[in-house]
Amino acid sequence: MNTPKMPLLLLLLRGEESFHRKSLMKIQVLLGMDSELDAVYSKNPSPVSNWEIERLKLRSFVDNTMRCISSVEAIHQLTRNIATLAVSNYVSQLVNSSVEFLDDGVSKMFRDGVISLDSVLKARFLADKFINEPSLLGLLHFSYDMKLAVYLPLAFPILMPVASSILAVVKRLIYDTQKQ
């Protein structure tokens, strides 16, 4: 007898079919596979149909492609806007490999109509690797003027009240010593 108060673990251990079906439906909603089919289509009796798997592949393909493209554009803008940035050979090889894998995956998609997740996932992995490379910011050199321009707006509002308080205390001490 199913009651709402039955513990979740007990439902899992007993293998309640309705519980598994409801759980699978909730997971499908979270994964974006909850769209309804038109009346002309039929759904297989399997819990996850082929079109849902293809939709997940396409969604993953698009997400990974967009993330990779944005990483490549970010590194391009970084090197274009900061003239003192030195990019190592390792980072440039990562960028080139990522672009090659991405181009391969996208061209397979347009040419053959086949979603090549392997190529796009490799491109995304390499893009994440080069965008988080510590050598990019480690080689960045800030001149004294640049450091002053960054730190002065941060330090001035803090140091001004401290300096005025110290000045007030010193004036008070001088006044008290002269009065005695």
Image: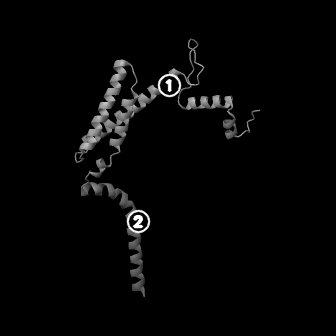
Instruction: Using the image, determine if residue 91 lies above or below residue 49.
Output: below
Q: Is residue 173 visible?
A: yes
Q: Residue at (62%, 32%) from the top-left corner?
A: 23
Question: Mark 2, mark 1: which one is toward the viewer?
Answer: 1
**Residue pointed to by mark 1:** 53
Instruction: Using the image, determine if residue 68 lies above or below residue 145.
Output: above
| Residue toward you, 160 or 65 | 65
Whether residue 57 sits left or right of residue 75 in the image: it is: right
Residue 44 percent location from the top left of the image? 58, 18
Outermost residue toward the bottom?
180
| Disc 2 crowd, CA 10 A, few/some/many (<14, 14-19, 20+) | few
Q: Amino acid at mark 1?
A: Ile
Could you tell me which quadrant the C terminus lies in?
bottom left
| Disc 1 crowd, CA 10 A, few/some/many (<14, 14-19, 20+) | few
Whether residue 85 sits left or right of residue 37 in the image: it is: left
| Residue toward you, 166 or 121 | 121
Residue 116 percent location from the top left of the image? 39, 26
Q: Residue at (67%, 40%) from the top-left corner?
A: 9
Q: Residue at (26%, 43%) from the top-left corner?
A: 90
Colouring used for the render = one colour
Rendered image quadrant of residue 159: bottom left
Could you tell me which quadrant the N terminus lies in?
top right
Residue 154 percent location from the top left of the image? 37, 57
| Residue toward you, 78 or 24 | 24
Q: Amino acid at mark 2?
A: Pro
Work out how far the residue at label 2 is from the one at label 1, CA to CA, in angstroms. Answer: 62 Å
Instruction: Using the image, determine if residue 147 lies above or below residue 180.
Output: above
| Residue toward you, 159 or 75 | 75
Whether residue 116 sits left or right of residue 40 in the image: it is: left
- Residue 161, disc: 2
Considering the numbered disc 2 on the image, is that residue within a helix, a strand or a loop? helix
Considering the numbered disc 1 on the image, is that residue within a helix, a strand or a loop? helix
